[in-house]
Image: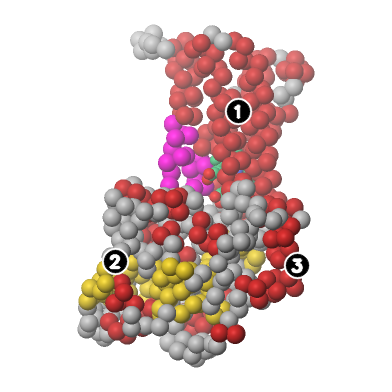
Amino acid sequence: MASDIITHTRFFGSNPVKEGEHYLGQWTLRFIIATLSITPLRQLTGWNWLAKHRRTLGLFAFGYLMLHWLTYALLDVQLDWGELVKDLAKRPYIMVGMAALLCMIPLALTSTRNSIRRLGGRRWNRLHTLIYPIAILGVIHYWMAVKKDITDPLIYAIVVATLLGWRVVRWRSRHGTPSTPVSA
Amino acid sequence: MRNHAKFEPPSSEITPEQRYLDRRAFIAVAGAIGAGAVTGLGFPGIAGAQQEPQAVGKPYGLQPDDKPTPWEDVTTYNNFYEFGTGKGDPVGAAKDFKTKPWTVRVDGLVNKPADYQLEDFLKPSAVEDRIYRHRCVEGWSMVIPWRGIPLADVIKRADPTAKAKFVEFTTLMDPRQMPGERTGVLPWPYTEGLRLDEAQHPLALLAVGVYGRVLPNQNGAPLRLVVPWKYGFKSIKSIVRIKFTDSQPKTAWNQAAANEYGFYSNVNPTVDHPRWSQATERRIGEFFKRKTLMFNGYADQVGSMYAGMDLRKNY
Ligand code: HEM
């Protein structure tokens, strides 16, 4: 039985469902971070070829998120609908995660070349700034999900804050008042 | 209030050897319901069946489909924050932990306070093997064959005064050996507590072994508490002090997050943790979730101690 393989190979340790859930959640966040890193990296290095990989990374984030969510719904809660609804209504970290997931869906749906053409670059770009709140929600969700040791979520929070801060600083230096020049 | 009439047989009456359920008997039970027993054959070598020690002991409060959790899981999947917050951390980080010599202080409101060498502390009591259910507050569970002495024995010897109402337990404070104690993740040293009547309950065990072997360091060597009707974190590890008090002791997790971890922390499927449901649990080694039982299946034995208490408030 497939469930025996999951529970007895110890590939994912003694509690493979939890381990898998955590593993997939972490990779979701890592791919979100990778996606957010492309623009600053381009700006720093001038490697414009990076741009064409941004969508791929974003789609990986979405894929891992789907697996993370499926692990939660199918393997962890095991489609206990009452429990799923209760989680969503009562547990803030699940609400935050679901908010991120809902924001992610339009991004995944408009990830095709065709969509960019249809929406036009400006509108497409504006829609895809949703990745910023997604990243913030993802970190908050992680922070709330851990029991006590917040070391890892703190590291992710710092990385996301740096990547978003970079954009704020760039934006300010272009649009901000000249009296507060920023050396970027 | 302390009515243990339903608790049987008394701990003094040790059941004959033949009636002990060993692992084979458990597998036979498991075979009846399918799954488990086949797995060892279906995936040779992966369950570590070869070196697996036999689970010995008298079963207490086990359900018909409860079988001992494999040694490997019991000894590698551990919450022991003194040795790291990952479940797999303690087995490595506690490898060189020094458990000899070990002194246990018994003090507070007792007529016979003393510092004992561990051997002397254990000597007067008969060591028993008992198979208990174990439920972690995080929603997973195991079935564990412990070896230990009844906590009630120790209490009787300490001879608490009439003022004693609670028992406070303290883990070793040694940041050089316990890297977790160099972090601020919990208030150190770890402390736990029981009401005196809970501590005197015949199910409360001070364990020195598991699977008939000396307790591995990662499982709380050399001396740990086991209170099977409460969430696992109540079963404090590597105990150096047992103190009798007249007021409710401060406990580590309660100090860290009072709204999540109460003093009582009795296993209760009807009172959720703020961040997850306690209605079900995942038995380590099983895929489908089980229903969590009131007092972890020990309601008949311990329920009367909490008669009339609002368990929603006293979580
Ligand atoms: C962008 C969206 C999301 C990200 C980045 C994310 C990431 C994470 C991370 C990093 C963890 C912790 C892993 C660990 O402790 O090592 C986690 C845990 C978890 N996440 Fe998510 N997640 C997201 C959305 C969701 C959604 C939509 C759900 C379900 C509705 C969900 C359910 C869970 C659950 C149940 C846990 C485990 C909590 C526990 O330890 O029991 N997540 N997630």
**What's the distance in space between the residues labelled 1 and 3, CA to CA?**
49 Å
First-in-chain label (2 vs 3)? 3
> Magenta region: which residues?
A140-158
Left or right, B94 with respect to A4, comes to: left
Callout 3: CB less than 8 Å from ligand 1: no
Q: Disc 2 residue type?
A: Trp
Would you say residue B118 sits in the magenta stretch? no
Q: Nearer the viewer, mark 1 or mark 3?
A: 3
Spatial separation of the CA atoms under disc 2 and disc 3: 45 Å
Residue B269 seen in this snapshot? no
User: What number is the disc on residue A130?
Assistant: 1
Answer few, some or many: residues within 10 Å of disc 3's Cα (few below 14, many 20 plus, some between 14 and 19): few
Q: Where is residue B49 drawn, in percent x and y?
A: 62, 61
- Colour scheme employed for the rendering of this structure: secondary structure
Q: Are marks 1 and 3 on the same chain?
A: no
Q: Which residue is mark 2?
A: B102
- In the rendered image, the residue lying farthest to the front is B50
**Both on one chain, marks 2 and 1?**
no
Name the image quarter holding residue B288.
Answer: bottom right
Q: Quadrant of ligand 1?
A: top right
Instruction: Report the magenta stretch's main SS.
Output: helix
Q: Which residue, given by chain and number where applicable, does mark 3 sit on?
A: B34
**Element type at mark 1:** loop
Whether residue B188 is visible here, answered yes or no, is yes
